[in-house]
Image (cartoon, helix red, strand yellow):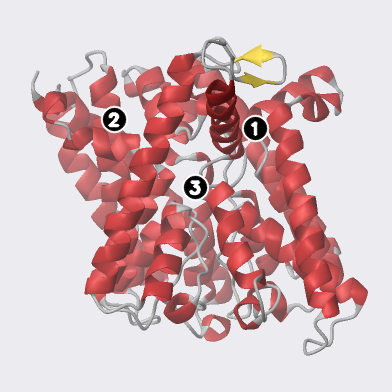
């Protein structure tokens, strides 16, 4: 492992991140909300930290190995989560502890959307926009952004790309050069964000809310500028726009790229993962909507029931975490179904969290194969997605990921129970964090404000595990990783 190259790279990335504070600083001057000094202080603290790491090692430009990429990404996300909390910690409003500031920052960067804040409607505009921006930066990954705009890093881009980008897209580049791939991804991401913001504005939001919610929607993050989230607007038009863009952001960005290149929407229909994703989303939304409509205690009309049902299903499946109504007060199985649909998540190569649809499909196909092998012990039965036979190495990797996911989930849940959460709240808290969904049930149905610091730090760990898909973090715990 090349420690000097790793530290130099992290320093460069921190210096780059410090420049992103100029946007909330601009918002502070526009709205005169009194937080400009806070952002100037934060800018110099983060810039100085990055400079101190980079400057002494600025001439270390050796090629990165795979193990260096894992360490850079894991350390950077941990450090970024901490440094991202600096403006929140220094600000007079909200008055946050160090733990709360780091939790809010990590939740933003990992696009989880779990929050410890209340009273958003009266909070300084620049702080609100900063939270939204954190999610937008984390959605496609600050490291991938660095590969797009800072090819002068002088480090091996593919190693960082594989450690950062979620899902099986890791091994496929959209363009011949990795910097070109990163630029293509960010161009698509920016285009979706701008289109979403304009749509929100035309449907009734002011520009501040439109841009802030577009940041969060494109990232499938879930932070809002209002305590009531989308319920604040009480607008079916806005809900339907959010449903569309959440679903779009939950699709594999490689499909968006291919659809634009070929000028055809047929690309989405031909992709089995996309069809499964959309089919499961629509069926689940209709089931929840029907349940809400036929429950007379809620008093929803058919349109309201279907809209709320579809909105919350899409929100949870894409791990956005937006709320159009108090779903945790719904009777019956609907709230539990929402939590479990969050386990599935979106497509690989999207901004959504969760296990990813393609992995769930492969787990199901492998289960089918095992049953058939019991009936026909000597038969060779391949696992196929469409007409493509999946290699055993891919199946093994998916099972390995799932096994580590379950073990990590159980350990963190048990530790949260030791810190005082009941079983339902602990299960929902881990599900909300490791799947990067945000809302939960029980004590964490609206926020993590009332839980202890121990639960919040465990939540930060779960969010990082979910965002970096388990392996990137857990590989660092292997003694063999550090052996050479």
Distance between the Cα atoms at labels 2 and 3? 19 Å
Total of numbered circles in the picture? Answer: 3
The residue pinned by badge 1 equals 253
Q: Mark 2 or mark 1, which has the lower sequence index?
A: 2
Alpha carbon distance from label 2 to label 1: 23 Å
Residue 444 point in image, percent of width and height: 45, 76
Mark 3, secondary structure of its residue: helix
Residue name at image x 43 percent, y 16 percent = 393
Mark 2 or 3, nearer chain start: 2
Residue farthest left in this picture:
483
In the figure, is residue 198 to the left or right of 396?
right
Provide the secondary structure element on which disc 2 rests. Answer: helix
Q: Nearer the viewer, mark 1 or mark 3?
A: 1
Residue at the far right: name it. 302
Is residue 330 rendered to the left or right of residue 366? right
The mark found on residue 137 in the picture is 3
The residue sitting at 65% across, 80% down in the picture is 326
Q: Residue at x 51, y 77 (%)?
A: 445
Assess disc 2: are there few (<14), some (14-19) or many (≥20) residues with their C-alpha within 10 Å of its C-alpha. Answer: many
Mark 2 = which residue? Answer: 70
Q: Which callout, 2 or 3, points to the residue nearer the camera?
A: 2
- The relative height of residue 427 versus residue 65 in the rendered view (above or below) is below
Cα–Cα span, label 1 and label 3: 16 Å
Image quarter of residue 458: bottom left
Of residues 38 and 421, which is closer to you in this image?
Answer: 421
Quadrant that contains the C terminus: top left
- Percent x, y for residue 292? 79, 76
The crowding category of the residue bearing disc 3, from other C-alpha atoms within 10 Å (few below 14, some 14 to 19, many at least 20), is many
């Amino acid at each position: 492992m090349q420690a000097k190259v790793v530290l130099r790279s992290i320093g460069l990335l921190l210096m780059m991140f410090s420049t992103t504070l100029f946007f909330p600083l601009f918002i502070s001057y526009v709205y005169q909300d009194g937080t400009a000094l806070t952002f100037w202080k934060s800018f110099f603290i983060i810039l100085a930290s990055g400079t101190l790491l980079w400057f002494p090692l600025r001439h270390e430009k050796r090629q990165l190995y795979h193990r260096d990429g894992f360490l850079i990404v894991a350390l950077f996300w941990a450090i970024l989560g901490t440094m991202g909390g600096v403006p929140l910690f220094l600000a007079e409003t909200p008055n946050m502890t160090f733990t709360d500031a780091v939790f809010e920052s990590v939740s933003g960067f990992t696009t989880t959307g779990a929050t410890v804040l209340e009273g958003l409607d009266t909070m300084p505009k620049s702080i609100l926009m900063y939270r939204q921006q954190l999610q937008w930066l984390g959605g496609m990954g600050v490291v991938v952004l660095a590969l797009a705009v800072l090819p002068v890093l002088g480090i091996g881009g593919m190693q960082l790309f594989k450690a950062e980008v979620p899902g099986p897209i890791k091994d496929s580049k959209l363009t011949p050069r990795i910097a070109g791939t990163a630029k293509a991804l960010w161009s698509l991401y920016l285009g979706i964000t701008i289109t979403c913001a304009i749509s929100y504005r035309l449907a009734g939001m002011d520009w501040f809310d439109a841009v802030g919610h577009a940041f969060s929607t494109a990232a499938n993050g879930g932070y809002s500028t209002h305590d009531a989230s989308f319920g604040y607007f009480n607008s079916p038009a806005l809900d339907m726009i959010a449903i569309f863009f959440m679903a779009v952001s939950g699709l594999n960005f490689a499909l968006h790229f291919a659809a634009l290149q070929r000028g055809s929407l047929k690309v989405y229909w031909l992709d089995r993962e996309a069809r499964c994703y959309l089919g499961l989303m629509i069926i689940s939304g209709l089931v929840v909507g029907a349940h809400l409509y036929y429950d007379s205690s809620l008093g929803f009309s058919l349109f309201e029931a279907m809209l709320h049902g579809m909105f919350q299903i899409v929100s949870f499946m894409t791990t956005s975490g937006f709320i159009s109504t108090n779903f945790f007060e719904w009777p019956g199985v609907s709230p539990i179904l929402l939590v479990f649909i969050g386990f599935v998540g979106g497509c690989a190569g999207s901004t959504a969290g969760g296990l990813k649809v393609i992995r769930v499909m492969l787990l199901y196909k492998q289960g089918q194969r095992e049953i058939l092998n019991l009936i026909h012990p000597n038969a060779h039965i391949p696992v196929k997605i469409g007409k493509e036979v999946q290699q055993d190495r891919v199946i093994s990797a998916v099972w390995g990921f799932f096994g580590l996911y379950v073990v990590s989930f159980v350990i963190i849940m048990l530790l949260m129970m030791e810190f005082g959460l009941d079983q339902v709240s602990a299960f929902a808290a881990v599900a909300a964090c490791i799947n990067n969904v945000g809302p939960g049930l029980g004590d964490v149905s609206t926020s993590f404000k009332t839980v202890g610091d121990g639960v919040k730090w465990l939540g930060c760990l779960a969010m990082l595990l979910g965002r970096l898909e388990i392996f990137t973090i857990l590989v660092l715990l292997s003694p063999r990783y550090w052996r050479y």
